[in-house]
Amino acid sequence: MADPWPHYLAAHVDIDFEDGRRTFVPAAPVALPEGLSPPLWIITACNPGGAARSEAVNHRENRRLLAAVQAAGWRHWPAVGRNADATWQEASFAVEAPGEAILALARRFGQDAVFRLDVGGLGVVGCALAAVPLEGSPCERPPGSLTNCSGRPRGWGSPPR
């Protein structure tokens, strides 16, 4: 794949919560189900580094990822990361967990990025980035602001260099 970042930044995410499926799009404010502690992180083990793998291999690796999420005791929901017209899709999980732990898990599975979902909307965070503000960062702008301290949209990273 050429530069995957334009695709990441335009991705949609469908999450199957207990009360039904909800679709989230980049930087659009959202109403999350009651009782969630944002942010939620959307993670997959499919196609690491943007390299296409067989459906069987992606399914096996996602089962391993799910086992790691369950072993950590994190709340999670089935999810699908996709493009706007759903011609590209990757099975994923929405996970309520610490951001640094999710980034470490994503790196373990060879992922370039994870999605971050909070009331400000859906964003993408590069797994190789160490300086992107996550939850609780002292330089994050107040709620409602669409940028973090780097001037990028809140929760969004830039491609690893």
Image (tube, helix red, strand yellow):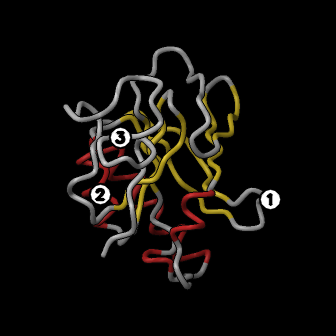
Q: Which of marks 1 and 2 is nearer the N terminus?
A: 1
Instruction: Measuring from the top left, give residue 43's x and y in whole percent.
Output: 45, 54
Q: Name the residue under label 3.
A: 148
Tag 1's secondary structure? Answer: loop
The mark closer to the camera, 1 or 3, is 3
Horizontal relation, residue 72 to residue 118: left or right = left
Q: How packed is label 2: few (under 14 Cα within 10 Å), some, or many (20 or more)?
A: some
142 or 121: which is nearer to us?
142
Q: Which amino acid does label 1 sit on?
A: Asp
112 or 75: which is nearer to us?
112
Disc 1 to disc 2, how far (Cα)?
Answer: 29 Å
Q: How packed is label 1: few (under 14 Cα within 10 Å), some, or many (20 or more)?
A: few
Disc 3 to disc 2, how far (Cα)?
Answer: 24 Å
Position of the C terminus, as image quadrant, is: bottom left
Residue at 56% x, 24% y is 32
67 or 34: which is nearer to us?
34
Q: Mark 1 points at which residue?
A: 85
The label on residue 105 is 2
Disc 1 to disc 3, how far (Cα)?
Answer: 29 Å
Instruction: Measuring from the top left, give residue 132's x and y in whole percent.
Output: 28, 51
Q: What residue type is labelled 3?
A: Asn
Q: Which of marks 1 and 3 is nearer the N terminus?
A: 1
**In the displayed image of the protein, which residue is found farthest to the front?**
151
For residue 149, what is the image quadrant?
top left
**Badges 1 and 3: C-beta atoms under 8 Å apart?**
no
Residue at 53% x, 54% y is 92
Horizontal relation, residue 33 to residue 132: left or right = right
Relative vertical location of residue 18 with respect to residue 48 in this rendering, above or below? above
**Badges 3 and 2: C-beta atoms under 8 Å apart?**
no
The label on residue 156 is none
Relative vertical location of residue 143 with respect to residue 150 in this rendering, above or below? above
Position of the N terminus, as image quadrant, is: bottom right
